[in-house]
Image (cartoon, rainbow, N blue to C red):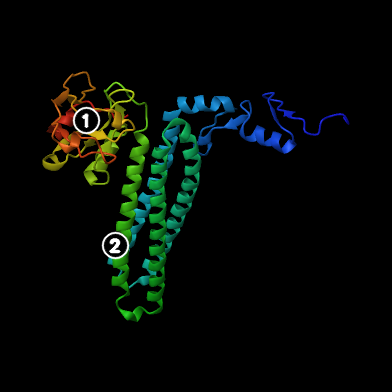
Amino acid sequence: MANECPRRSLPCHLCQQLVGQTELELENHLKNDCPEGNVECYFKVWGCEYTGPRKSLNEHLKAQVDYHYGTVGTEVAKLKTVVTELQETAQDLRNEGASSSPSSEGVAETVDKLNERMKKLQLTMVQKFDKIGKLEKAAEQTAKKTDVQKEAARIDTIASQTTTLANRIQKLEEKSGQGLRARKGGATQQSLEQRVSTLENQISLHAMRLAEHDVRFQVHGTTSYNGSLVWKIKDYARRKRDADSGKTLSLYSQPFFSSRYGFKMCARVYLNGDGIGKDSHMSLFFVIMKGDYDSLLSWPFKQKVTLMLLDQGGGQRHLSDSFRPDPTSSSFQKPTAEITSPPGVLVCQPRRFCQQLQLPDG
């Protein structure tokens, strides 16, 4: 091939494009750009087994949004299980300290177990945090990058708090060891109990943050642009227990819009009630959110709002309430924050009546 031009372009054997003059450029094209090249789904680390041509990947991502976020939610649920185990271990440590104050050996042994569980939680968080980069790349094709960055920031916060918690456990372990070497000091047991109490509070905070994170994954779904929202709350029984215990006081629905470029809105529910309805009623709010096209809209928000709790058992005992916004209220002006303060609220009948409505758990 002595007559070949040394600067000739090399064709790709898959898409037939002329892509470069060196084998390295051709290899880079096949790896990163070729529309016919096989690629794996960005969500493979979360369990998706899709493999196909690069040109079809975007369609797959759009078609499988619910599945992808469902797998992410499952992983978050597993992480919550680890935190629950930590809470139980911390309680065991507290009980042991209260029942056997002369025995620092038993406390130290339990602290060792707690420390080991904390290391496992740290490892899990590192794995989840590593996957967030891939999640952000995938979500650029299916959602706003700013939304994904917020999710990543929340996990970053959890990871940071986990590190802080691990450091506290390390110090607790060191203090326990000092107590074994100087049991005649007298104050070691009380110090351990105080530190265990602090540890329990920190773990509870982790559980609450993870619960909130789980909720945010659950609300991802199809978006309505006709001003109507049908919101079905997944795992209702569990979420109701979380509300009763104070772990997750409220839930937000997925956003919906009055039109394609209209007002951005969502619903917020307190399953255990809010304000005067706390512990006795269910409270539902209508919320105005900050949207991308607010500068094009006419403010204040003036449209009639109807809130309804649907009876899914066929009894047609729906509960509803309607209101027209107060144009002088700051809640209906152009938002300056991501979410405005809830203006319209439906406080339904006492919870025992709500529970009589058919509310499937799925």
Residue 140 on image: x %, y %: 47, 34
Q: Relative to residue 185, is residue 306 drawn left or right?
A: left
Instruction: Choose mark 2 or mark 1, whichever is in front.
Output: 1
Disc sitting over residue 299 in the figure: 1
Q: How many residues crowd around disc 1 within 10 Å: few (fewer than 14), some, or many (20 or more)?
A: some
Q: In which image quadrant can residue 348 be found?
A: top left
**From the image, which quarter does the N terminus lie in?**
top right
In the current view of this chain or complex, which residue is farthest to the right?
2
The type of residue carrying mark 2 is Ser
Question: For the residue labelled by badge 2, is the local secondary structure a helix, a strand or a loop?
Answer: helix
Residue most extreme to the bottom: 184
Tell me whether the residue at label 2 lies in contact with that at label 1, contact meaning CB atoms closer than 8 angstroms. Answer: no
Residue 114, compared with residue 300, is above or below; it is: below
Kindly identify the amino acid type of the residue bearing the numbered disc 1. Answer: Trp
Quarter holding residue 248: top left
For residue 163, say whether it is visible.
Answer: yes
Task: Name the residue that disc number 2 marks.
Answer: 197
Disc 2 from disc 1: Cα separation? 50 Å
The location of residue 291, given as percent across then percent down, is 31, 33
Seen from the viewer's position, the closer of residues 81 and 129 is: 129
Q: Is residue 309 above or below residue 89?
A: above
In the image, taking residue 220 as reference, residue 50 lies left or right, namely right
Q: Quadrant of residue 244?
A: top left
Where residue 45 sits: x, y (%)?
52, 39
Residue plotted at (40% across, 75% down)? 178
Q: Pick whichever of labels 2 and 1 is earlier in the sequence.
A: 2
